[in-house]
Image (cartoon, helix red, strand yellow):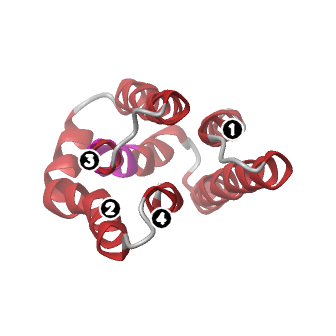
Amino acid sequence: MSWLVYRMNKLGFSCLVSLVFSGQFPTVIFGSFAGVYADRLNAAICLLLHRRSRCWQPFLLAFLTLTGLVAVWHLIVLSIILGTVNAVDVPARQSFVVDMVENKNDLGNAIALNSLCSMAQGWWGIHCGHSYRLCRGRCLFPAQWNQFLFHNSGRSWL
């Protein structure tokens, strides 16, 4: 998103800072409440709902960009929504891994595999998007869906 803000207005350093802050703001504000919320609900259902709500953000961003309707305030709102979803998703995901492991001796391996999937999905989506941008000359936001698909396929290993 920061790249898109930079492309939209060449003087946008302050907009970039506000965009980065708007994505982290909900996590800071709702982080502790989201942890309590995630612990009280079924972690599998909570993860499913949050993953589905998280995967529609790139499609909305791609639609706004490809139709030429995108504005900086759209990006800030989408970033706030994504930050709110992430604030609930991270504690639910971490508690879900602990709940899934039956043998507590395997807990370290499960946590390591969870971290590997989280890091690999970020790497995969970013590199697919940048490869497309280098070949076609424009950014492809649905490449973020590769992150969603790769992360969920890695989750099935657990």
**CB atoms at circles 1 and 2 under 8 Å apart?**
no
Mark 2–mark 4 distance (CA, rounded to whole Å): 11 Å
Label 1: which residue?
146
Q: Residues within 10 Å of mark 4 (few under 14, many from 20)?
A: some
First of labels 4, 1 by sequence position? 4
Q: Give the left or right position of residue 25, taking residue 47 as reference.
A: left
Mark 4–mark 1 distance (CA, rounded to whole Å): 24 Å
Mark 1: amino acid: Asn
Where's residue 9, x and y in %? 41, 62
Label 3: which residue?
73
Which disc is residue 56 wearing?
Answer: none
Q: Which residues are magenta?
A: 76-92
Q: Nearer the viewer, mark 4 or mark 1?
A: 4
Nearest to the observer: residue 75 or residue 108: 75
Residue 90: in magenta span: yes
Mark 3–mark 4 distance (CA, rounded to whole Å): 13 Å
Q: Nearer the viewer, mark 1 or mark 3?
A: 3
Which element carries disc 1, helix, strand or loop?
helix
**CB atoms at circles 1 and 3 under 8 Å apart?**
no
Residue 22: in magenta span: no
Nearest to the observer: residue 85 or residue 81: 81
Label 4: which residue?
6
First of labels 1, 3 by sequence position? 3
Residue most toward the right?
135
Q: Residues within 10 Å of mark 3 (few under 14, many from 20)?
A: few
Mark 1–mark 2 distance (CA, rounded to whole Å): 23 Å
Mark 2: amino acid: Leu
Label 2: which residue?
19
Where's residue 23, x and y in %? 31, 57
